[in-house]
Amino acid sequence: MGLFSNKSPFDAVTKISVFPTISAVVLRKDDRLVVFNPRYLLGKHGTGTDQIASKFMNLRTATQLLELIDRNISASALQGQKVELKEINFGEPVGFDALVKLPLDLVDRLKTEDVRGNEINVIPTDRGKVPQTSLLNIILVPFDPKYGDGVDNLFKAKYGNFMKFENFKFVYAIVTIYPGKFAPPMTDRNWWREHALLREI
């Protein structure tokens, strides 16, 4: 590397590192890393999932998901303990928004269903009646090796000790990415008491 070279030592790491044995992807954004599991994220909000949730339109593959994430996360946004990129407006539909705020007369009167381990208000809705949305949310938290399925070790094996996760300024894991209005975690019972998800029937 020449004295006046603009190359960063982080350039030794490719922009995209894929670890298929654990269905993990590591996306490099300058001196920061974003880790995600396409199978998990598409299983929650991708096209074709049966889960009750806001869902993307025509998002079926890990490659499509990677392009969406890469396009909407900048290195400058990756700082702090938790990164919430809320209601990014695409200007055109990206999915279906199944979230609704309940009128006061319906609070505590709807049937709840188990949605990923949480009792959530659910409203049966005719197929094709869940509204489209142009909004997108991406939620990231600092990477925790306990939940990484060994991706940090596979990364170190690929790039050597000089490019471990610890060498990067920030390393985040995407916990969810979904279309529609922003919602807090389902464990926020007070908030979810006043909101519901639309389930197509």
Image (cartoon, rainbow, N blue to C red):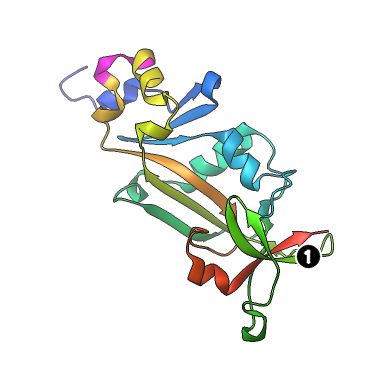
Residue positioned 29% across, 23% down in the render? 164
Q: Quarter of the image containing the N terminus? A: top left
Magenta: main secondary structure equals helix
147 relative to 81 in the view: left or right: right
What amino acid is found at the position of numbered circle 1 in the picture?
Pro
Q: Quarter of the image containing the C terminus? A: bottom right
Residue positioned 52% across, 55% down in the render? 137
Q: Residue 95's spot in the image, x, y percent? A: 68, 55
76 relative to 48 in the view: left or right: left
Instruction: Confirm whether the magenta stretch covers residue 143.
Output: no
Residue positioned 48% across, 62% down in the render? 184
Examine the rendering and report whether any part of residue 90 can be seen.
Answer: no
Per the image, the residue denoted by label 1 is 124
Q: Which residues are magenta?
A: 158-162
Q: Is residue 156 above or below residue 116?
A: above
Q: Residue 175's spot in the image, x, y percent? A: 48, 45
Q: Residue 138's spot in the image, x, y percent? A: 49, 51
